Amino acid sequence: MAGMSILDIPVARLDGTPGTLKDLTQGRPALLVNVASKCGMTPQYAQLEEVQRELEGRFTVVGFPCNQFGGQEPGTAEEIQQFCSTTYGVSFPLAEKIEVNGAGRHPIYVELTSVLDAEGNADISWNFEKFVIDARGTVVGRFGPRTTPDAAEVREAITTAIENGG
């Protein structure tokens, strides 16, 4: 990856449209989250959408559906989109369903997990783990699944990302 930014890594949208992470973030600082429709933390979609609406134009949320934790994202792309739109009014971009751990880990998550979590682990622990990146793709914060999108430490990382080149 020498000379290549995480923003240049190819990732398709949920509808299959090819692109890069930069396309999904529109070159803005972003909150990247591995999401699932059938998880106890799925209601975080509402807070993610609040962040998206509040900071629209300066920051974006990107969801990465993943079925690696308890089979909690079993749906097709269409089912995931329908659920997110109807249940939570999600307007932020959703990527194709990916793997965030193991041999099939998506290249974006290879880069993200180079920043260890608070316990010193690289692997994603569960659905709704959060990464705040600045507009250059640098990780400025990593937060566990139970840390909500509106938690003070997440909001502080978002503010830092926006101020540092948003």
Image: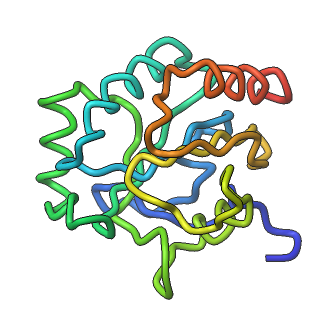
| Residue 107 image offset from top left, x and y in percent | 59, 73
Q: Nearer the viewer, residue 11 or 122?
A: 122
Q: Is residue 124 above or below residue 52?
A: below
| Residue 55 image offset from top left, x and y in percent | 56, 16
Please state, as top left, top right, bottom left or bottom right, where the N terminus lies in the image. bottom right
Question: Residue lying farthest front?
Answer: 119
| Residue 32 image offset from top left, x and y in percent | 54, 45
Count how many numbered circles sit on residues in the image.
Answer: 0
| Residue 77 image offset from top left, x and y in percent | 20, 58
Q: Nearer the viewer, residue 24 or 86?
A: 86
Query: Residue 123, located in which quarter of the rendered image?
Result: bottom right
Q: Nearer the viewer, residue 49 or 15?
A: 49
Q: Is residue 152 left or right of residue 48?
A: right
Q: Residue at x 14, y 30 (%)?
A: 87
What sort of colour scheme is used for the picture? Answer: rainbow
Please state, as top left, top right, bottom left or bottom right, where the C terminus lies in the image. top right
Question: Residue lying farthest top?
Answer: 54
Q: Is residue 130 left or right of residue 63?
A: right
Q: Residue at x 26, y 39 (%)?
A: 42
Q: Residue at x 49, y 74 (%)?
A: 101
Query: Residue 75, located in which quarter of the rendered image?
Result: bottom left
Q: Is residue 159 above or below residue 45?
A: above
Q: Residue at x 41, y 72 (%)?
A: 99
